């Protein structure tokens, strides 16, 4: 056993044997095997639904619920914020005064009061 | 180490629900798992607890085992991790200093005592090594795993495994040589 052998790529039987003896388990082999096998069913029960799978099982319904909520929120918000569509004729018809029709059909440049009036009427 | 083809067959049978197949795997790898766990933990009772944790964890994760690779290194990785976890959780004792009576001369004991004394010295020397180093040397010189397999077990580069084994061997061989000189 020389120091040069420390980089040897093969196991050292002498050192390995001494270490094996030093690390040899103190309790009986068969008793240990029986002890592990005694926990067999319990381990499988515990391991049937690992934590990750529990999280994964909640993940998909959670994502689906979030998407559904977003769609419903979008539709509901759109219904409230968007005014009911009006026809082009209704938009053109003046409720009072010269209004938008006068603004569009006029040949002369519009007077500022006409422009202002068309805005006010639409509001 | 077990036969790879047989191991894979036993894994298949275990996955099919055959309890006995897993029992054969435990019987086959128990000694190795207990030694590796003891290399990490030092205390034999803690080591047995960790080895048991490792086996049961392997049972639960068995479907994740890649049958194209050897079973032993896969299992030893789980056992070594279980031992490391237990060591962290319990803050297991650090290496106890060598008993001066074991280091110095003293009367020459009989053969059994000599063997026991060497074992005690080696365990103490192992306990003084960093955890990764002592696990690497045990996996290499005791369990016969290759550097590449140990790299997979410990999750470190192969070059680091070579370095760890080298340093561990240098320390342990010095101790072993000193002991042989004293025993003459």
Image (tube, rainbow, N blue to C red):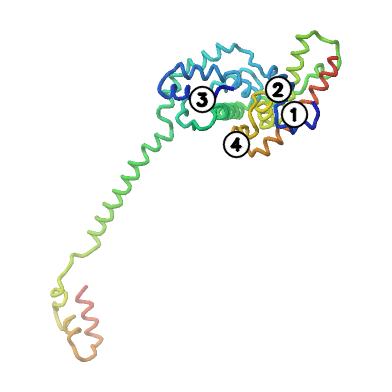
Relative vertical location of residue A79 with respect to residue B24 in this rendering, above or below = below
Q: Which residue is mark 4?
A: B155
* Subunit ID for the residue under disc 1: B
Residue B151: quarter of image: top right
**Do tags 3 and 1 sit on the same chain?**
yes
The residue at the point 18 percent across, 88 percent down is A106
User: In what element is the residue under mark 2?
Assistant: helix
Is A117 left or right of B17, judged from the image as shown? left
Q: Quadrant of the C terminus of chain B?
A: top right
| Mark 3 chain | B
Cα–Cα span, label 3 and label 4: 25 Å
Give the structural element (helix, strand or loop) at label 3.
helix
Along the line of sight, the residue nearer the viewer: B123 or A3: A3
Q: Give the labeled residue for mark 2.
A: A16
Residue B138: which quarter of the image? top right
Question: Where is mark 1, residue-wise?
Answer: B169
Q: Are marks 1 and 4 on the same chain?
A: yes
Q: Say which of marks 4 and 2 sits in front.
A: 2
Which numbered disc, 3 or 4, marks the residue that appears first in the sequence?
Answer: 3
**For mark 3, what is the residue?**
B5
- Callout 1: 10 Å neighbours few (<14), some, many (20+)? many
Spatial distance from mark 3 to mark 2, Cα to Cα? Answer: 26 Å
SS at badge 4 = loop
Q: Is residue B55 visible?
A: yes
Image position, residue A26 (x, y; %): 64, 13
Circle 3 packing at 10 Å, graded few (<14), some (14-19), many (20+), is few
Foreground mark, 3 or 4, reads 3
Q: Residue at x 68, y 38 (%)?
A: B160
Q: Are marks 4 and 2 in contact (CB under 8 Å)?
A: no
């Amino acid at each position: 056993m020389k120091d040069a052998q420390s980089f040897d790529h093969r196991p050292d039987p002498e050192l390995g044997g001494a270490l094996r003896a030093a690390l040899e388990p103190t309790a009986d082999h068969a008793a240990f095997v029986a002890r592990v096998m005694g926990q067999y069913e319990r381990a499988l029960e515990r391991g049937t639904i690992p934590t990750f799978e529990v999280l994964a099982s909640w993940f998909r319904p959670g994502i689906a619920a979030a998407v559904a909520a977003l769609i419903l929120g979008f539709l509901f918000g759109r219904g409230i914020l968007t005014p009911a569509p009006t026809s082009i004729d209704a938009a053109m018809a003046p409720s009072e005064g010269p209004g938008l029709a006068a603004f569009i059909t006029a040949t002369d440049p519009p007077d500022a009061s006409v422009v202002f009036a068309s805005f006010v009427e639409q509001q | 180490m077990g036969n790879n083809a047989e191991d894979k067959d036993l894994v298949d049978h275990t996955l099919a629900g055959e309890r006995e197949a897993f029992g054969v795997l435990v019987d086959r790898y128990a000694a190795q798992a207990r030694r590796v766990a003891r290399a990490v933990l030092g205390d034999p009772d803690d080591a047995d607890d960790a080895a048991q944790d490792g086996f049961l964890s392997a049972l639960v994760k068995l479907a994740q085992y890649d049958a194209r690779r050897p079973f032993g290194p896969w299992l030893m990785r789980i056992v070594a991790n279980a031992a490391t976890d237990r060591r962290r959780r319990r803050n297991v004792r650090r290496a106890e200093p060598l008993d001066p009576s074991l280091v110095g001369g003293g009367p020459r004991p009989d053969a059994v005592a000599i063997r026991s004394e060497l074992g005690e010295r080696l365990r103490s020397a192992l306990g003084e090594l960093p955890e990764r180093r002592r696990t690497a040397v045990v996996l290499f010189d005791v369990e016969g795993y290759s550097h590449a397999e140990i790299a997979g077990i410990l999750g470190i580069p192969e070059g680091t495994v070579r370095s760890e084994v080298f340093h561990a061997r240098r320390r342990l061989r010095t101790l072993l040589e000193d002991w042989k000189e004293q025993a003459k």
